[in-house]
Amino acid sequence: MPPGEFELIERYFSRSTPRRDVLLGVGDDAALLEMPPGRVLVAATDTLVEGRHFLPGAPAESVGHQALAVNLSDLAAMGAEPAWALLSLSIPSADEDWVRRFADGLHALAGHHGVALVGGDTVRGPRVITVTALGTVEPGLALRRDGAQPGDVLYVSGSPGEAAAGLERLGSGAPFDLADPLVRRYLYAEPRLALGRALAGRATAAMDVSDGLLGDLGKLCAASGVAARLDLDRLPVSSALAAHGTLADRERWVLYGGDDYELLFTVPAPAAMAFEATLRSSVPVTRIGAIEAGSGVRCLRRGVEERVEGSGYDHFA
Ligand code: ADP
Ligand code: MG
């Protein structure tokens, strides 16, 4: 007999937590969480719908990972330290094997970042997963989208575009093969939490790239009331990406691909060298342009302006 709602919760979602700030976790009507003094709460929530945000047939572990990762990425983009998460899980049946593997993926990522699952809801319905991630940040150090200033250096972390390339391979029938670095990158994107913390108080603006670098840069510019120059020649292309597709494919993945959850951010030019020096050991970051007065995004190739679809944010109006 398949397990009931309460057995599923008991077996897979009520692990004890090592966090001492969880005064009361899963099992009561709500959780009691102790805020560290002098910090503010940072809250983010994101929903994944099967067939829309993850592929039917995706390994359940990867769905559990992704459901938390997209939310931790939002906390990273705010410069927050993650602490707690809530999970609302809608599943068509009490498929215990799927739930166990989903929970394994979610708990693995949570454990890696010291996040405690402190509550949620479990219902029958189409496969839809909502995670709410909670963290804290020192007021004044939070990273926002609206602080970019003309003259700031524009950076992106890691290697955007890999996940989009992986998704495209899966879409054309490739197996869910974790030995394929691009597929793996799509299924197991890493939220850039350490980088976000390193940026807190240093970057003038930051956001995570979830809808594609070009479009998200347009959003950052709009929020800050500035324009950006994007140097197409400087866009990072990882070795995994370089081995696939044409030049045009790679540029499309890097500019328009989502799902990598890299951070896009700006640093005042005089502080940029020192900033890069302090980051040497963690995730790579690449200068890809600069903030300018005005509005919209100008794309330059070898110093010559090029019309790139979706660059002026007016296109999204
Ligand atoms: P209530 O009816 O009071 O809302 P529920 O019966 O829905 O409580 O849930 C019982 C307990 O289990 C609550 O503490 C709730 O937060 C927790 N819970 C339910 N589903 C999940 C889940 N998927 N993940 C984590 N905690 C869950
Ligand atoms: Mg209740």
Image: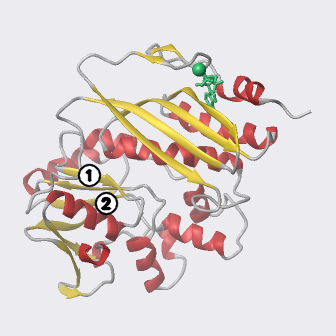
Q: Secondary structure at mark 1?
A: strand
In the visual, does 92 lie left or right of 66? right
Secondary element type, mark 2:
strand
Q: Looking at the rendering, which quadrant does residue 79 occupy?
A: top left
- Decide: few, some or many residues near mark 1? Use Cα within 10 Å; few <14, some 14-19, many ≥20: many
Looking at the image, can residue 281 be seen? no
- Say which residue appears at 39% left-offset and 15% top-offset: 34
The mark found on residue 230 in the picture is none
Between marks 2 and 1 in the image, the one whose residue lies nearer the viewer: 1
**In the depicted view, which residue is nearer to us: 266 or 86?**
86
On screen, residue 134 above or below 45: above
What percent of the width, then of the height, locates residue 128? 62, 49
* Image position of 279 with respect to 305: above or below: above
Mark pair 2, 1: CA separation: 10 Å
Quadrant assignment for ligand 2? top right
Where is mark 1, residue-wise? 206
- Protein image colouring: secondary structure
Rendering quarter of residue 296? bottom left
Which quadrant: the C terminus? bottom left
Task: Point out the image quarter for the N terminus.
Answer: top right
Query: What residue appears at the point 54 percent right and 71 percent down from the top-left corner?
Result: 165
Which residue is depicted at the point 63% across and 73% down?
Answer: 169
Residue drawn at the location 67% of the way across and 77% of the way down: 172
Q: Mark 2 = which residue?
A: 156
> Mark 2 vs mark 1: which is more N-terminal?
2
Kind of residue at disc 1? Ala
Q: Considering depth in this image, is 303 or 296 the residue closer to the camera?
A: 296
Residue 186 coordinates in the image, percent (x, y): 56, 60
| Residue 299 image position (x, y, % from top left) | 24, 79
Q: Is residue 282 left or right of residue 176?
A: left
Mark 2 residue type: Val
Which of these two is toward me, 19 or 284? Answer: 19
